[in-house]
Structure formats: C-alpha cells, structure tokens
Amino acid sequence: MNDATPPPSAPRDLTMSGRRLVPIMVVLIVLITAASIVTFMNQKHAFDYRTLCEENLKSLGVALFAYQEKFGSFPPASLMLGEKPAHSWRVLLLPMLHEKDADDLSAVYRWAEPWDSEHNSHLLNDFMPAAYHCPSQQRARWSFRHTHFVAPIGPLTAWPTSGPARVSPVGKQILLIEYRNEDIPWTKPQDLMVEAWPDETIGESKTGIGSPHGPEPLVLFADGTVERLPASTSLSELRKRCLKPGNTEK
C-alpha cells in the first residue's frame, strides 16, 4: 500500500492572480519599449534639427560675405525710412540666399514702404526663407514667421549702428547668434543690442539668447565656423567676442 500523499494543489485564487499578471506585464513591457523608442526618436530629431540649424547659420555666413563681395560691406542692420528703422538686413540678404522663393520675394518687396505695411506684411505671412528659422518650428504657422537667428548690434561689431561694416572673413568674431524666443518677425528690423545685455550668464538671461533645443545657442564666427556656446557663458564674455577688433566701419 502506497502511503505517499500527493502535494497539495495551488490555491485557485493565487493561480488566477498569476494569470492576470501576465497580460499586465506584457502591457508594461510594450509601454516601456514604446517610451524608449519615442525617447530615442526625439533625441534623433533634436540632433538632426541642431545639425540643420548649424547648416542654416553657415549658409547665412556665405550669403553675408557674398553680399560684401558685391556691395563692399555687410548689409546694414536696418534701413531707415525717415527717422525710423524700416527694413531688416534679412530682407536685404534675400538675393544672396539662392532660394527661388527668396528671389521672387525680393522682386516684389516694396522698399518705399516699411516692413509692416499692408503689402509687405502679406509677404511676411506668405514666405520665410529656410535659412532664417529652426526647421523644428516649420509646422507651426505662428513660429514660421519668426526668425531664430539675430545679429549682435553695437560699435565695433559686424553690425554697427553708424552704418555698414566691412568684415574680415577670418578669426572668431561672432556675426550671428541663435535666438530661442519667437517674437521677432523675420522681416522686422530688430536684433540684439550688445550694450543692453545685463551681467548674467546665457542660461540666466532673459535676452532670448538660446536655442529652440535648449539653453546653449549656436553662434556663427567670421571664419565661417559654427559652435555651440555653454549656457554658463557670461553675456559680458559673449559681448567681447562680438566686439573683437578687425572690422573697419564704412
């Protein structure tokens, strides 16, 4: 006679709990995997956008020196109508961008009217050169009207208020700075006055200096290179790099 006692079976409620956990675990694994993929794709897109922004700045550098080759100097930061700034250097640079739409816009832009006249405002809303904005913002209609690159304006910069300057295409003088805010329409004669910068770091400042991708802005140098500045860079140091000697005011 076999006296061995069979092992007790698992409680029914415990077995059912285990069965319920299986689909929950599957769902969690799927969600974690999906989140990882989304994070990876966002990081990849951010990297791609940063790379495209660097290329945009480089293309603006080429256009600026092409303008200087043709006219003898950089464009002025703004053109005046009477005593008011009326047109931006970004509009003056249109023929040098080698974009068909830019050429068409330059041909119909009315220089006898300010940038925000009824006619010129329609042009602002209809088109913006790719070089003037971050491609990550191109789907937003409001953002698409605003520039992400600005000129540092002031004495001994590449953009003196006294008139256009001739710039040497060597060295590390900063010509253009990435701008994170979306409050400057690309045709508006508005940029950044270096003398107005407070004694803060880039990361602390409310000047708008920065990137749509984070606090570290890209800058374009006179030698055509583009670099990203740390957010810990002081605005006084940034100002010095914009004011580097070597320009002769025209």
Image (cartoon, rainbow, N blue to C red):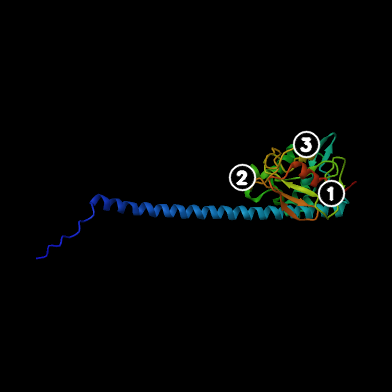
Lower position in the chain sequence, tag 3 or tag 1: 1
| Residue 110 visible from this viewpoint | no
**67 or 20: nearer the eye?**
20
Q: How many residues crowd around disc 1 within 10 Å: few (fewer than 14), some, or many (20 or more)? A: many
**79 or 246: nearer the eye?**
246
Q: Disc 1, disc 2: CB below 8 Å?
A: no
Looking at the picture, how far across and down is residue 116, in whole percent?
A: 74, 37
Q: Cα distance, mark 1 to mark 2?
A: 31 Å
Lower position in the chain sequence, tag 1 or tag 2: 1
Instruction: Provide the residue designation for mark 1.
Output: 74
Amino acid under disc 1: Phe
- Give residue 218's mark: none
Looking at the image, the residue that sits furthest to the left is 1
Amino acid under disc 2: Ala
The answer to whether residue 168 is left or right of residue 232 is: right
The answer to whether residue 150 is left or right of residue 22 is: right
Give the mark toward the camera: 1 or 2: 1
Instruction: Provide the residue designation for mark 2.
Output: 140
Q: Secondary structure at mark 1?
A: loop
Taking the spot 85% from the left edge, 40% from the top edge, the residue there is 161
Q: Secondary structure at mark 3?
A: helix
Amino acid under disc 3: Ala
Instruction: Provide the residue designation for mark 3.
Output: 196
